[in-house]
Image: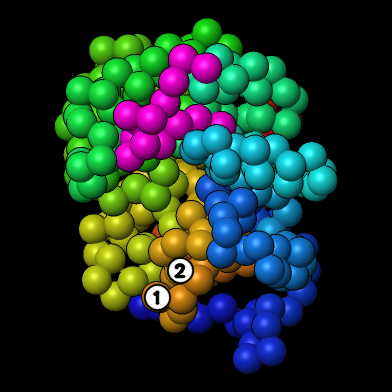
Amino acid sequence: MFNINPCYTNKGFLKGRETMLFDTHTHINAEEFSIDRDEVIVRAHEAGVSNMVVVGFDRATIEKTMEIVKEHEDMYAAVGWHPVDAIEMTDEDFDWIATLLKDPKVVAVGETGLDYHWDKSPKDVQKQVFRRQIQLAKTVDMPIIIHNREATEDIIAILEEEQAHDVGGIMHCYSSDWEHAKRCLEMNFYISFGGPVTFQNGRLAQEVAKRVPLDKLLIETDCPYLSPHPFRGKRNEPARVRLVAEQIAVLRNKSLEEIAEMTTNNAKTLFRLI
């Protein structure tokens, strides 16, 4: 079932040739890349990654995100506030994010959503901050990147109540079932898959990846997290989005080039880059 990347050797990624991939969710702003960020970006280009969105979710990561995307023409920013840290968000932070959304390099609000795995921020605070960012996205007519951990029903309910359909967005690193995916699709959201779709125990993600309409399908790494098979447990990086695309190509009985073209066009359409 697992199609190991033919363009990867023990020396690294070979040229991606004409294959163009769009990693829609990266954290190369993270400290894990502080030493070799430039080399990581080079490897991504060599693997065929033509574009990526760098996601900032608090003061430090947003500042670094804006610094990075200003230096790279093929990179774009998403800015928002992570649910785990919702309790720390101030009105000043919110106003700052609203100002940044005017920057032409910023293409989405997020990541935002709900995270019930950690108990740092109470659920009611998370919901309030989540709703506020949905409303902001609607004000500026910009898509939303959704973080969901153990909170699917509440997230969908809030998206429906806030009429998020008006702007749509991405269900980032999707891990729920097909029934919930259909509800998200009905609200104008794209479904994005990362490393877990390549895992041997990733059957749920694989089943959903087989069924998502091709014009609503996206790929990502969420690096430095969730490195795909056969690098599970190691630091992830944007070049490995190619492994995600290859696995989806196998699941959908398509070529890598077809999945690359479709998901790249989808990302550019969503982020209004074409």
Residue 232 to residue 107: above or below: below
**Quarter that holds the N terminus:** bottom left
Kindly identify which residue carries mark 2: 227
**Quarter that holds the C terminus:** top right
Indicate which disc, 1 or 2, sits on the residue closer to the N terminus: 2
Kindly identify which residue carries mark 1: 233
**Quadrant in which residue 179 is drawn:** top left
Residue 60, percent from left and from top: 57, 41
Residue 124 to residue 48: above or below: above
Contact between labelled residues 2 and 1, with CB atoms less than 8 Å apart: yes
Magenta-drawn segment: 79-92
Residue that protrudes farthest toward the bottom in the picture: 10
Residue 176, percent from left and from top: 24, 47
**Quadrant in which residue 85 is drawn:** top left
Q: Which mark is residue 63?
A: none
State the separation of the CA atoms marked 1 and 2: 6 Å
Secondary structure beneath disc 1?
loop
Residue drawn at point x = 34 percent, y = 48 percent: 174
Residue 40, percent from left and from top: 69, 67
Q: Is residue 30 visible?
A: yes
Tag 1: amino acid: Gly
Crowding at dot 1, Cα within 10 Å, few <14 / some 14-19 / many 20+, comes out as few
Tell whether position 152 is magenta.
no
Residue 53, percent from left and from top: 62, 44
Q: What colour scheme was applied to this rendering of the protein?
A: rainbow
**206 sits to left or right of 204:** right
Residue drawn at point x = 65 percent, y = 48 percent: 52
